[in-house]
Image (cartoon, helix red, strand yellow):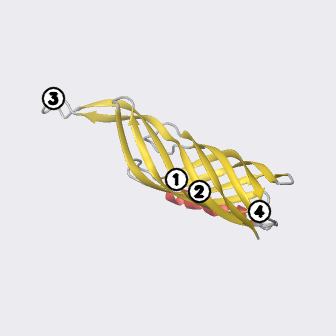
Amino acid sequence: MTKRCLLVLALAASVATGAFAQSPWSIGGGAIFEGGSLASGERRITVPGPPGSGGFPVMVEERLRQTGFGAWVFVDATFVELSVAFMGGSQTLICATRGQVRDESVMVLDATLLGKLPILFGWGDIFPLLGVGGQLNFGDLIEDDVHFRIVLGAGGDIFLTRNIFARASILGSYRFGFWDRWGSGGFGVAIKAGIGFRL
């Protein structure tokens, strides 16, 4: 799965390189908050039974949620934004069948490639956003720490000077569950805000 993630990011970088041949470029960064569901599904576990029985199997329903806060940086051209974020947060594993909840701290490395279509105004611009992303999670609650998602949202820039602008965006995403343990993915949301500089 890690090799698949690296391949997707390499292809994204290749596409972005061609898109960045446009002008003008801009760079920037700021803060990001993200939260939502990573995946859900059912799995078979063994629960203790009478002494000597070895236990007995039951099906349990599980949901995995994640929240994070951190920093992000971006490079973009007129119609493309490539961003990388590093977040600290928590993962929560909810076993609905047995009423159990497990929490742990997690570190997340996120990369997102978005297409955007700016609509210009005198004070700045607004733009719809559509693209793909991948996350690498450093935690113990999931066996496979890489997942991918489709991203959809909107953003905008407010021109502060000729070459400096404030940027904010809100993004919804659907995360794919690639693991045998999870029957489906989950929906999440990210809010970003920062300052950019036109090159």
Kind of element beneath mark 3 = loop
Three-letter code for the amino acid on which mark 2 is drawn:
Ala
Is 155 on the left-hand or right-hand side of 125? left
* Circle 4 crowding by C-alpha within 10 Å: few under 14, some 14–19, many from 20: many
The quadrant where residue 124 appears: bottom right
Percent across and percent down for residue 77 are: 77, 62
Alpha carbons under labels 1 and 2: distance apart? 8 Å
* Residue at numbered disc 4: 77
Give the position of the C terminus as an image quadrant. Answer: bottom right
- Identify the residue at horizontal 35%, vertical 30% (top origin): 99
The reply to whether the C-beta atoms of the residues labelled 1 and 2 are less than 8 Å apart is yes
Q: Quick check: 15 above or below 132?
A: below
Kind of element beneath mark 2 = strand
The quadrant where residue 62 appears: top left
Is residue 17 visible from the viewing direction of this image?
Answer: no
- Identify the residue at horizontal 16%, vertical 31% (top origin): 53
Alpha carbons under labels 3 and 2: distance apart? 53 Å
Looking at marks 4 and 1 on the same chain, the residue that comes earlier in the sequence is marked by 1
Q: Quick check: 179 above or below 107?
A: above
Q: Nearer the viewer, residue 71 or 44?
A: 71
* Residue at numbered disc 1: 69
| For discs 1 and 3, the disc positioned in front in the rendered view | 1
Is residue 111 visible from the viewing direction of this image?
Answer: yes
Looking at marks 2 and 4 on the same chain, the residue that comes earlier in the sequence is marked by 2
Three-letter code for the amino acid on which mark 3 is drawn:
Pro
* Residue at numbered disc 3: 50
* Residue at numbered disc 2: 31
Q: Label for residue 92?
A: none
